[in-house]
Amino acid sequence: MNNIFNTIVISLLILFTFTTGSCDRKSEIIPFNFIPVESTVGNYNMLNLSDFATDINKPRGGFTSSELGSMYRFKDDVRIYKPINDTIFTISQDAKIKDAFILELGKYGPTLSYFERKEIGGDLNEMIRQRNSLSQKFIFINTIYESRNHLFFKFTFGNHAPEPFEYVGFFGNSISSEVCGVFDKFSGKLALMRQPIKGKLGFKNDIDNGPVIFPHYLSSNNELVTYISVEDFLDYYEKIDKPTPQMAEIAKNIKIDDNHIVIIAKLKE
């Protein structure tokens, strides 16, 4: 696959505030409230990269950046989402605000009183403990990415997580309740994703047998962009039985202190 671009630049140059207004609420409703508390692993699907992408380029070294909150570009507009409301808003080029998608989390959505901290009290440590405990009751949307045909979500499921896993974070060992999901704009269906590998979130890479993939960015050219550290790449490479010649070449030429490896997958039209 020919490289579409040689440098990935993720920049956010827009600061704005909302003004009070009204929405016609004719946007598409995403029914997240179908998720039952008693969900088991059997209710979740394994999704393959080839179901969504046509090709994947040679991973290459690069740099990374983070988006500010839940704000992202879709075509010529800016989308924004905040957990305190149920709507993904669009800010158009003429600075008009309208709703694009309504997210129905139902009884699993965080309440206003949770955000206002009306349900907790005591000293600082006790308030933190209560807030962490209370947050386990809810489902939060951590990140949203949008392509021409799909919305890609990463959730925190709290006590409802079907496949919690342990990981080493900044403060030591922690338990993750994250779940990935894909919403099809045409069918109106949301698919929640099982972990292809324990502790790895995203698509099973059945195109070139590479690492598990989930977007960190979606380009205006309908490309899924993600990255992986050299350490994680080498750990994955050592565990697979039949690495491709391409992966073998990468593993041979990279050093442990190299920059992250950027992977770009071309999504289906």
Image: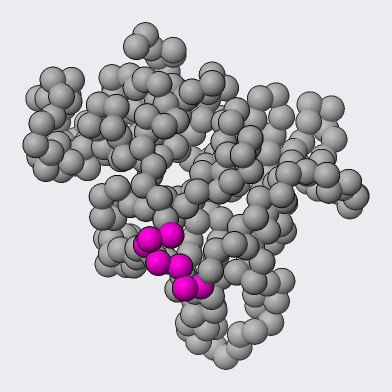
Q: Does residue 131 appear to the left or right of 46 in the view shown?
A: right
Image x and y of residue 195, in percent: 33, 52
Q: How is the image coloured?
A: one colour
Query: Does residue 128 appear anywhere in the picture?
Result: no
Q: Dividing the picture into quarters, in which one does residue 42 lie?
A: bottom left
Which residue sits at x=63%, y=66%? 109
- Quadrant (top left/top right/bottom left/bottom right) for the N terminus: top left
Q: Is residue 42 magenta?
A: yes
In the figure, 160 relative to 96: above or below?
below
> In the image as oriented, which residue stretches furthest toward the bottom?
122
- Quadrant (top left/top right/bottom left/bottom right) for the C terminus: top right
Q: Dividing the picture into quarters, in which one does residue 139 lie?
A: bottom right
Which residue sits at x=52%, y=83%? 130
Image x and y of residue 198, in percent: 26, 55
Q: Is residue 182 magenta?
A: no
Which residue sits at x=40%, y=66%? 40
In the image, 132 versus 89, the foreground residue is: 89
Q: Does residue 171 appear to the left or right of 4 in the view shown?
A: left
Question: Where does the magenta region start and end?
Answer: 37-43
Report the label total.
0
Q: Does residue 156 appear to the left or right of 84 in the view shown?
A: left
Query: Does residue 74 appear anywhere in the picture?
Result: yes
Image x and y of residue 192, in percent: 47, 52
Which residue sits at x=44%, y=13%? 5
In the image, 188 versus 63, the foreground residue is: 188
